Image (cartoon, rainbow, N blue to C red):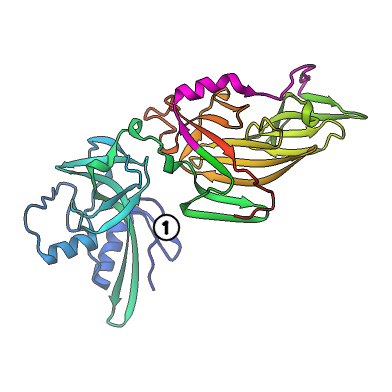
Amino acid sequence: MLVFKPCTPFLIKRLNNNCISNKHLSVLTALLLSLGSYHPAIASQSVTIDMRKPMSAAQLAEYNRDGIAIDYDNTPVLKHVYVTAKDGAIARQLPSGAAKNIKDYRVGTKLDVIEDNQQWYGIRDSVFRQYDEDYDGHDRMQIEVVRWEKVYIKKDQTGSLASIALTPKDLNIVSHVSVGKKDEYFESGKVLNDYLKIELIDKALFEKKRSLAVDFLSHKNAIKKRNGVISIQLAKDSLTLVDNNSEEDTENYRYIGRIDDLDQHLVAVRYWESQGYRMIDQVEGHLTQEFLDYPYISPNKKYIISAYANSYEQQTDLGLYKIDGREVKPIISAGFQNWMPTMESADMFWASDGYLYLAVTHSAAYWQEDGNLNDQSQFIRIKVVDGVAIVKEF
């Protein structure tokens, strides 16, 4: 069986795990045509499809099989739009709701518009196609092609990033959940209601609750770093944290403060491409717990929530923990796929009314079109569900 797999998006194939470049493509295509019935695309980017005109069944079959191939470098982009439909959008072969579904787009996907066709946009994108061909009358030859094509998407499913906003149904959708030793991943997302209650609120309520913010962090007798070393005095000993800037590993420490109610020191640590926070026991100096982002302690000192804006996965990695004396035990970690907290630390606080308040943006609109962080926020609040326990399974 002859198999082609993509090496790059446009006209670079793989034959028996060996890449062949564009300059050999014409020779290979001629060979394939001589071997079987493989066909190139029947149209080019200059073709404008008018669905008001009749199309034969044979024409439709050819479009469905071969699509509309384009020359990436010589196809002008008219503008960019973004998928704004809450459930995403479908790219179709032709500007018709009855046409073949070519691929699906998530909300927030940036699209290159190369044709404006009444209620549809022609979009430039790479498309994967697979062909099963007869060879020499009895053998089967499988051809896989990835190339640039023109596909179509409804205009009313697109718009600007600024028009993407959270709704109440977006808030508790997760992409993964970890409870104890059990990890689950959900390609299409899953509703999580068992641990946290999450609500959309307005800015006025958010600002009103700032005065109720609680903070158990003490900055008295703050420990300063000297020559890349932080020395923490314990009950009977001392703990030394030394910066490491070697090529193989990077760890840089910053002392944040003490949490006297829990007998803990809080230290921030920055790695080569990530960061974290460590709680260190004031008495014995052992690592109590490590968090992806700042650990916010509930007013009743029973829980901790850490919410990290994961810009790589475009989601929030949230951890919920139970406080048991000087121990901090994980309850659940989850990836909330539709919202991300802002970068301003002042825009997240746990208030004395029992809610954690956050300024957030829709994950799809976390970055603005100019590449900067979105400065337009929405607001949510989170409450731990009564009776949640460490042993609870998802």
- The quarter of the rendered structure image containing the N terminus is bottom left
Would residue 179 be seen by someone viewing this image from the given angle?
A: yes
Residue 92 screen position, x and y as percent: 25, 53
User: Which span is picked out in magenta?
Assistant: 199-228
Dividing the picture into quadrants, the one containing residue 318 is top right
Residue 281 screen position, x and y as percent: 81, 34
Mark 1, Cα crowd under 10 Å, few <14 / some 14-19 / many 20+, is: some
Would residue 75 be seen by someone viewing this image from the given angle?
A: no
Residue 283 screen position, x and y as percent: 87, 32
At 69% from the left and 53% from the top, the residue drawn is: 391
- Judging depth in this view, the residue of 348 and 351 nearest the camera is 351
Q: Is residue 106 left or right of residue 33?
A: right
- Judging depth in this view, the residue of 229 and 175 nearest the camera is 175
Q: In the rendered view, would you say 385 is above or below 272?
A: below
Residue 32 screen position, x and y as percent: 28, 67
Amino acid on which the number 1 mark rests in the picture: Cys
Q: Is residue 174 left or right of residue 83?
A: right
Dividing the picture into quadrants, the one containing residue 5 is bottom left
**Residue at the farthest bottom position:** 138
Q: Is residue 179 magenta?
A: no
Q: Mark 1 — residue?
A: 19
At 29% from the left and 56% from the top, the residue drawn is: 102
